[in-house]
Image (cartoon, coloured by chain):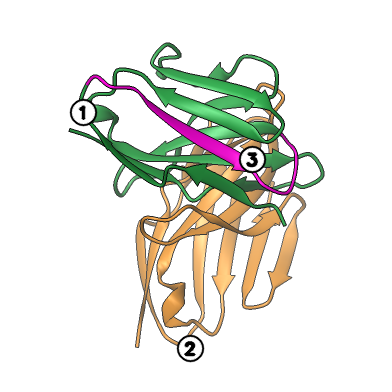
Chain colours: A green, B orange
Amino acid sequence: GAVVSQHPSRVICKSGTSVKIECRSLDFQATTMFWYRQFPKKSLMLMATSNEGSKATYEQGVEKDKFLINHASLTLSTLTVTSAHPEDSSFYICSARDLGRSEQFFGPGTRLTVL
Amino acid sequence: GQNIDQPTEMTATEGAIVQINCTYQTSGFNGLFWYQQHAGEAPTFLSYNVLDGLEEKGRFSSFLSRSKGYSYLLLKELQMKDSASYLCAVRHSGAGSYQLTFGKGTKLSVIP
């Protein structure tokens, strides 16, 4: 149990385009989902916390107008990187929290490359 | 703010025991997690401590001392597949959602 999926696993896009990443909790309801970014050889950095049905809470330094987060249901959250630039190239990972469990469960990640 | 320190790299021999330390300073402490992350993959959960003491799970054990802001992950009977990064993460109350702050990870190399 407690499986989280992400789609796509890998995406390459041109500078200036927008990319949407989906995060789904497959066998549990996730009232809270988290979005992280990880640059090569660096740790995971929390970008935002997303609660179902409400606006996401962004960490300091993360532009909410650039990284649009939607958590429309208890099993789906989406991250849209708008007008992507090469410096946005990174490994984006979502996690979901099951109310009945202590740990967060991570999706497999999405590797974004912006040319 | 949150601050988490762990060694950058460690090397150990197959079949041996290795201890990875983690120290932290945080407000609103609500538990400490250890995750394993292989290169290019997402982290997988290993252990969780919220009270002082040792939690054992097969070949993996984790210890917590809240008064010292200290934890360690102990890996026994090391296998080659244990070569990975090990992330220490502290959970703290933030926006009511119990956010995790991760350390930079310890890259463990297991050699024959």
* Residue matched to label 2: B15
Numbered tag placed on residue A14 in the rendering: 1
From the image, which quarter does the C terminus of chain B lie in?
bottom left
Res B1 seen here: no
Q: Mark 3 points at which residue?
A: A96
Residue A20: in magenta span:
yes
Left or right of B1, for residue A32: right
Labels 1 and 2 within one chain: no
Viewer-side residue, B70 vs B88: B88
- Please name the amino acid that badge 1 sits on: Lys
Q: Residue flagged by tag 3: what amino acid is it?
A: Ala
Of badges 1 and 2, the one in the foreground is 1
Residue furthest toward the top?
A65
Q: In which quarter of the image is residue A61?
A: top left
Q: Few, some or many C-alpha atoms within 10 Å of disc 3 (few <14, some 14-19, many ≥20)?
A: many
- Going by the image, does B28 lie left or right of A22? right
**Does A54 appear above or below A93?**
above
Q: What is the span of residues highlighted in magenta in the rendered image?
A: A16-30
Question: How many numbered discs, if any?
Answer: 3
Estimate how packed mark 1 is, as few (under 14), some (14 to 19) or many (20 or more) residues with alpha carbons within 10 Å: some
Image spot of residue A43 (x, y percent): 40, 44
Labels 2 and 3 within one chain: no
Give the label, 3 or 1, closer to the camera.
1
- Of the two numbered discs 3 and 1 on the same chain, state the one appearing first in sequence: 1
